[in-house]
Amino acid sequence: MTRLGVPRERTPGERRVALVPESVARLVKLGVAVVVERGAGESAYFADADYERAGATLGDAAAAWAADVVVKVRRPMADEDALAREGAVLVALLQPHQSPEALAALAARGVTLLALERVPRTTRAQYMDILSSQATVVGYKAVLLAAGALPKFLPMLTTAAGTIRPARTLVMGAGVAGLQAIATAKRLGAVVSAFDVRPAVKEQVESLGAKFVAADLATAEAEAAGGYAREQSREAQERTMEALRRHVREMDVVITTAQVPGKAAPRLISAQMVREMRPGSVIVDVAAESGGNCELTKPGETINVNGVRILGPLDLASSVPADASQMFSRNVANLVEHMLKDGQVRVDAADEIVGPMIVK
Ligand code: NAD
């Protein structure tokens, strides 16, 4: 019988948990023995008692790390490495590119490392795609942050005190996070427009009731393999900024989510464009972690430039910990189920989903 451990997250600010009671019950039914560290779900509002009811055993960190397979949200902190045991499999957002040295110690201890960031973006694997599920949370929360900072309503209101015009919102980068931002802003009644370099996105944007702007700048060449965007040349980026400039200055809210895998976030809003915006407008730069889509963004901070607030939030998914964990957990349980062969979790390097996840 495979033993699966769920340690409590120790990274400061991380509130999610990798497995919630609902998924524990599902894995227990499949014959997996689950050990959960006491308090692992607390910051996401999942109680120890619910884990026990779902069939888990509670224990300390060492008990959770003694399992055959350890599932986590974040890669372990340095002081946890010593708990990892030889021959175990660790499944988490391991950031293999950003911090390979942090993983070297674990690999040296004989731990097999599976990076959740590397789940391939294929139709078959989408039930395990944590980047997508967490990007959905990010897009949603970005709009709520904007609404909270805006000195206006998002929807149009017709009241005895007269009519209030709806807020104009622009979403730049319409991947998973951007599309959820569009949907959320629409639900809240904003007038929404969006831009992406990939023309394939136009139809998705329009099906959500938003207007696709600067369509002539979106070209098929901008799309790389797997549906991702290619990095634009400096000249192309400047053309994009110039075309969007008129549009940005009309906006009450701008949400930016543009990313190119493995690269610094593309620059879409210059300092000059910010100066042309009206005081009271809000920019939420979801790409803050990878350098920001706005030239002035400070990761993790909110700055005020002539009355325009620029938010550079980090860890947005963790700020909706209950549902973000729920989605994370379903993705993880789908992956574990996929890896189960005759009641044992097997890391098959030839498997089209698991193979690319192995960190060498
Ligand atoms: P992402 O987070 O890598 O990037 C966000 C968006 O920014 C993308 O839409 C990208 O085109 C856009 N962008 C990049 N540079 C830009 C620029 N200079 N200006 C404007 N926009 C720019 O993207 P994502 O949400 O991970 O999705 C990327 C693609 O992968 C999409 O086609 C999506 O449908 C696909 N996808 C497929 C699966 C699956 O099949 N399982 C799962 C998730 C995503």
Image (spheres, rainbow, N blue to C red):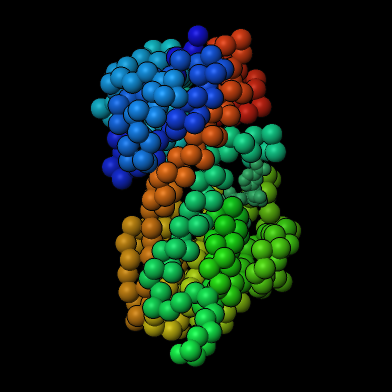
**What residue do we see at 32% from left, 25% from top?**
37
Task: Work out whether 288 lies above or below 37.
Answer: below
In the image, taking residue 192 as reference, residue 8 lies left or right, namely left
Snapshot quadrant of residue 298 = bottom left
Task: Work out whether 253 lies above or below 230.
Answer: below
Of residues 239 and 349, the one nearer the viewer is 349
Task: Work out whether 334 lies above or below 198.
Answer: above
Instruction: List x then y, in percent, for residue 74.
Output: 39, 36
Of residues 324 and 266, the one nearer the viewer is 324
Of residues 303 and 188, the one nearer the viewer is 188
In the image, taking residue 285 as reference, residue 102 lies left or right, namely left
**What residue do we see at 45% from left, 57% from top?**
141
Instruction: List x then y, in percent, for residue 11.
Output: 31, 38
In the image, taking residue 119 as reference, residue 43 lies left or right, namely left
**What residue do we see at 45% from left, 30% from top?**
21
Snapshot quadrant of residue 69 = top left
Instruction: List x then y, in percent, for residue 314.
Output: 38, 53
Snapshot quadrant of residue 330 = top right
Instruction: List x then y, in percent, for residue 210.
Output: 65, 69
Of residues 159 and 121, the one nearer the viewer is 159
